[in-house]
Image (cartoon, coloured by chain):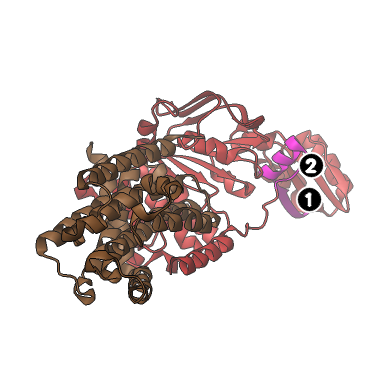
């Protein structure tokens, strides 16, 4: 990697973080969604649903809620590419003597940074819902959050490359983001789903991320929470990340 | 020596040729104007030269580098002020330029002084640390010009730089732009459809429907529509016409109590005229052809500087819409 690419990646991430810090409302508003789901949905459902092995429902969905935080904030952060296109700032980046690859990686790392910060805020709520996590567990959860954030940010960029304007926003929300969330095992174990839907969960990278998070959050309840081996989870996330970045960089490279 | 060379450049979008076999060269250190109505192919040409669009056929070279094959070399050598605003409005003026200097790999120790120089040059140094969203349209444009010179490009592209600005901002922007070649040694390639703005160019190409229909210096182009016209009011028009014919061998005619004659260089002609007619002259005025007359003559229609598109307002609306969605 040459120096100019490194500079470009650095400055793209820096820009995103500066804006993230300045728009204080953004942090609060993006954290509101997982909080509502965790306490209003999770808390309410706990009275009705009781998974086996004595895990309260609110604890069962906790890894899923971390995954949700990462999903929404990564995809939204990447979709800022569409706003950049709309408001012209993208041209400033595309006309610069930097490789398209570094623009894509820079954008993906911006999403990673922003999402990981938010995931960490949600993660630190664990004592409130009665979970006990050791420092090692927290570090591992953080590591998984980082690679999952990168993967989903890269996916967001790939989605954004196909849209030219913001009107597609609700399409992306309703047909990509929400189904990805529900078909990820966040709210219920994947193996309970009918086989047809099971296929969708298996091609959903978020499933593997949440699976790995479940493993870390509730390690002694593996039978209940784990659908895939941890090694598979991490490999799937890593491989899909690379695929998303490469395709997105290629789409960017194409000149009309 | 030509720093931009374009040969037989064609760009087709499907069956439609937006740019149709144009050729021109731009001298180093000069100001080159690309003139034409909206949709003539100006922005398409700029986008090809800036390596943002591919070309269908022909050749485009900047400083000896092929715009298609050596895009990263070309990008290092050019600066661009796009038609639409491309600043990040949430960032400050300084931050926008800093972002740019990282993207263009400006050496670490040069970043601060160059950014400060550029901000000084366009008179925005005092407002370095203000977010761009508080800037007026004219200030944003000036900031974009400042940004485009931070990495010391060899060629600067300005696509309709004054579009949507009020007359005062336009004048002050041109002051900065016209100083650039001398001060920073750049070659300027600009497009505009304001004919009077093209007067500062050393060379102009007039483009219509994807084809260059004339090129040359503003003076050359104006000669195409004939020379200047001098209007005179005299105490005795008939005698004046006769005297002019005898002394200068120029044909003057009378219309509405005024006599008029055309001359290649009207300004140089006036002193002799007044000497010839002595104290018969009551008033003199000189009318010079404008580039608009040239365009009118070549295409049979005038370039109308149309009202600013509602684009910016729409974009602002989108922005607030977006904010709502984010929350």
- Residue B18 found in image quarter: top right
| Label located before the other in sequence (2 or 1) | 1
Locate the C terminus of chain B and report the quarter of the image it occupies. bottom left
- Look at the image and give the residue range highlighted in magenta: B280-303
Q: Are marks 2 and 1 in contact (CB under 8 Å)?
A: yes
Q: Colour of chain A?
A: brown
Disc 2 chain ID:
B
- Closer-to-camera residue (B168/A256): A256
Residue A177 picture location, percent across and down: 43, 56
Residue at image x 31%, y 59%? A67
Label disc, if present, on residue A199 of the rendered structure: none
The residue where tag 1 is placed is: B232
Q: Is residue B218 left or right of residue B174?
A: right
The residue where tag 2 is placed is: B261
Reply yes or no: does residue A174 show up in magenta: no
Query: SS of the residue at dot 2?
Result: strand
Query: SS of the residue at dot 1?
Result: strand
The correct choice, above or below, for A211 with respect to B226 in the image is below
Residue A218 picture location, percent across and down: 19, 61
Report the chain shown in red: B
- Closer-to-camera residue (B132/A37): A37
């Amino acid at each position: 990697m040459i120096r100019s690419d490194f500079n470009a990646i650095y400055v793209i991430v820096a820009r995103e973080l500066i804006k993230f810090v300045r728009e204080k409302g953004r942090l609060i508003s993006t954290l509101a969604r997982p909080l509502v789901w965790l306490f209003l949905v999770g808390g309410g459902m706990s009275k009705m649903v009781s998974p086996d092995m004595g895990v309260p429902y609110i604890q069962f969905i906790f890894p899923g809620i971390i995954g949700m935080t990462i999903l929404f904030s990564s995809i939204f952060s990447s979709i800022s590419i569409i706003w950049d296109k709309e408001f012209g700032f993208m041209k400033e980046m595309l006309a610069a003597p930097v490789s398209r690859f570094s623009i894509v990686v820079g954008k993906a790392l911006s999403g990673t940074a922003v999402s990981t910060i938010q995931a960490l805020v949600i993660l630190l709520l664990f004592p409130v819902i009665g979970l006990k996590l050791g420092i090692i567990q927290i570090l591992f959860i953080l590591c998984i959050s980082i690679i999952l954030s990168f993967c989903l940010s890269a996916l967001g960029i790939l989605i954004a490359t196909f849209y030219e304007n913001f009107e597609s926003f609700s399409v992306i929300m309703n047909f990509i983001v929400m189904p990805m969330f529900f078909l990820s095992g966040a709210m219920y174990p994947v193996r309970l789903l009918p086989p047809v839907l099971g296929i969708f969960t298996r091609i959903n990278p978020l499933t593997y991320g949440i699976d790995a998070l479940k493993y870390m959050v509730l390690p002694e309840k593996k039978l209940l929470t784990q659908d895939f081996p941890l090694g598979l989870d991490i490999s799937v996330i890593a491989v899909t990340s690379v695929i998303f970045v490469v395709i997105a960089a290629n789409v960017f490279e194409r000149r009309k | 020596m030509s720093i931009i060379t374009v040969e037989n450049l064609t760009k087709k979008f499907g069956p439609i040729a937006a740019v149709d076999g144009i050729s021109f060269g731009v001298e180093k250190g000069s100001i080159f104007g690309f003139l034409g109505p909206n949709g003539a192919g100006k922005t398409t040409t700029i986008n090809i030269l800036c390596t943002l669009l591919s070309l269908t056929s022909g050749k485009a070279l900047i400083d000896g580098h092929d715009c298609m094959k050596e895009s990263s070399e070309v990008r290092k050598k050019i600066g661009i002020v796009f038609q639409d605003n491309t600043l990040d409005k949430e960032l400050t003026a300084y931050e926008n330029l800093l972002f740019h200097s990282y993207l263009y790999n400006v050496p670490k120790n040069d970043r601060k002084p160059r950014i400060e120089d550029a901000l000084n040059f366009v008179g925005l140094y005092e407002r370095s640390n203000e977010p761009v969203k508080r800037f007026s349209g004219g200030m944003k444009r000036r900031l974009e010009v400042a940004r485009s010179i931070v990495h010391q490009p060899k060629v600067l592209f300005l696509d309709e730089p004054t579009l949507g600005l009020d007359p005062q901002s336009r004048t002050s922007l041109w002051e900065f732009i016209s100083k650039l070649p001398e001060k920073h040694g750049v070659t300027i390639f600009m497009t505009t459809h304001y004919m009077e703005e093209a007067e500062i160019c050393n060379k102009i190409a007039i483009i219509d429907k994807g084809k260059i229909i004339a090129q040359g210096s503003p003076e050359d182009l104006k000669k195409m529509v004939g020379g200047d016209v001098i209007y005179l009011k005299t105490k005795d028009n008939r005698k004046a016409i006769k005297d002019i014919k005898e002394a200068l061998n120029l044909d003057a005619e009378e219309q509405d109590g005024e006599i008029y004659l055309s001359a290649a260089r009207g300004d140089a002609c006036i002193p002799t005229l007044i000497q010839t007619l002595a104290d018969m002259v009551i008033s003199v005025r000189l009318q010079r052809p404008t580039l608009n007359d040239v365009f009118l003559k070549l295409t049979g229609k005038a370039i109308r500087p149309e009202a600013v598109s509602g684009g910016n307002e729409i974009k602002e609306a989108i922005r607030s819409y977006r904010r709502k969605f984010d929350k």
